[in-house]
Image (spheres, rainbow, N blue to C red):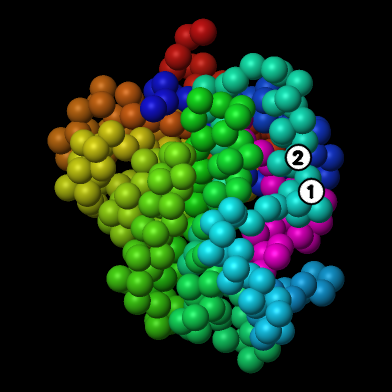
Amino acid sequence: MFQSFSTTGIGSLPHSDPLEACRVIFDSVDIPFWPQLPHRSFLEFMVPQYSEGFPFIKIQGENIHAEKANEQAAASFYEAIDRREGFPISKEYAAGLYAFIDILNEKKQKLKTVKGQITGPLTYTLSLTDNQKKPLYFDEEMRELALELLKGKVYWQIETLRPYAEEVLIFIDEPILSALGTSTYIGVDTAEALRLLSELVNHIKTSGATAGIHCCGKADWPLILSSGIDVFSFDAYFYWDTLSLYPEEIKAFLDKGGFIAWGVVPTSDIIRGVTLQGLREQLERGLSSLVKIGIPGDRLEKQLLLTPSCGTGSLEINDALRVFSLLKDLKNSYVKT
C-alpha cells in the first residue's frame, strides 16, 4: 500500500495563494495532497467546502445554517443522488484542488499516490445547525441526505484525482469524534456513529480508493478502527500513549494490513520550540508503548506513516513551513535517501 515512513499532510495550510501552498506540499511530502485554504475564503472551511450544491443549507457571508429547500431544488438533488455521478467541488470552494491538478498536469507523469480529504458525516451534521440551533444530525432525513452529499463529493474527488496516480488516498476528517460522549453530544448513538463512518469508508473503497480517518483529539479508537479503514491517523504528539489501551483492536487492525499515521509533528505554536530529536523521542515513546503490549516493532515501522498532528491552517505561514520541514527531516532521520 505505502512505503514505511512515507509522509503526507492532513489538509489545511495558512496560505492564501493556492500555487504557493501546493509548492510547499510537493517539496515536503511523499504523498502529495491538495490544500484546503481557509484564509483564502470562508467557503474553504471544512463544512462550507463540501456544501456546494446542497439545497438544504444557506451560506451568507461567514455564516452557514440549514434551512428548508424549495421543492424544485430538493427534487433536483434527489435526482442527482440517483444518477450516482457525484457532486462537483468548484474552484470557488477549493482553489487548492485546482492548483494541485494544474501542477499534476504539468508533471505529465503518474504519481504512486495522491491524497484528498472529506469532512466526516459526524462533524458535518453536528456542526451544521438550523435556525433553532438544532444540529442537522438530529433530523434523520437530513442526516441521510448529508451522508449522500458527502458520498457524492468524495466520489467526484476520487474520479478527479484518479488519472494522476496509481492510488488515491482519502482521509475522512472527523475532529468532532473527540467530543462524542460529552454532555454536548449526549444524544449521539455510538452504533449510528459507526454506521455513518462505515458507510462513507465503504463508499470510498468501493469507488476504488484507500480510506483513512483522521481525528486530532483523543477519541473512541475502537470505534474508528472497526469502521473498515485502511489508515488510522491521530495526534501522536499529545496522545501517543492512548493506543496501548486497546491492544486487541490495534493488533487486529495491523493484522488486516492497516497503516497507522503518526501525527507526531505538532500543529500549534509550540512548533517553534520543537526539535527533531524531541520528535524522534516522542515517536519512539509511542512505538515502545505498543511493543510493550506485544506488537513487534518491525511490524509497527513497516505499517507506519508520518504526518503533522492536524492541519496547519490555523498557524502563521512560517510556523507551517517549520512543521513540514521537521516532518521531512524526521522521515529522513529514519530512512536514508
Residue 63 at least partly seen: yes
Q: At x 49% / y 81%, what residue is drawn? A: 141
Q: How far from the left and from the top, in percent, is residue 263? A: 48, 40
Left or right of 83 in this view: 69: right
The Cα–Cα distance between marks 2 and 1, rounded to whole angstroms, is 6 Å
Residue assigned mark 1: 91
Instruction: From this view, report whether residue 120 is shown above or below residue 243.
Output: below
Q: Is residue 72 left or right of residue 128?
A: right
Marks 2 & 1, CB-CB < 8 Å contact: yes
Quarter assignment of residue 57: bottom right
Report the amino acid beneath label 1.
Lys
Q: Disc 2 designates what residue?
A: 98
The residue type indicated by label 2 comes to Tyr
Q: Characterize the magenta stretch by its predominant secondary structure.
A: loop
Question: Quick one: SS at disc 1?
Answer: loop
> Which residue is found at the position 72% from the left and 33% from the top?
101
Q: Give the range drawn in magenta.
A: 30-54
Labels 2 and 1: the sequence-earlier one: 1
Q: Is residue 276 magenta?
A: no
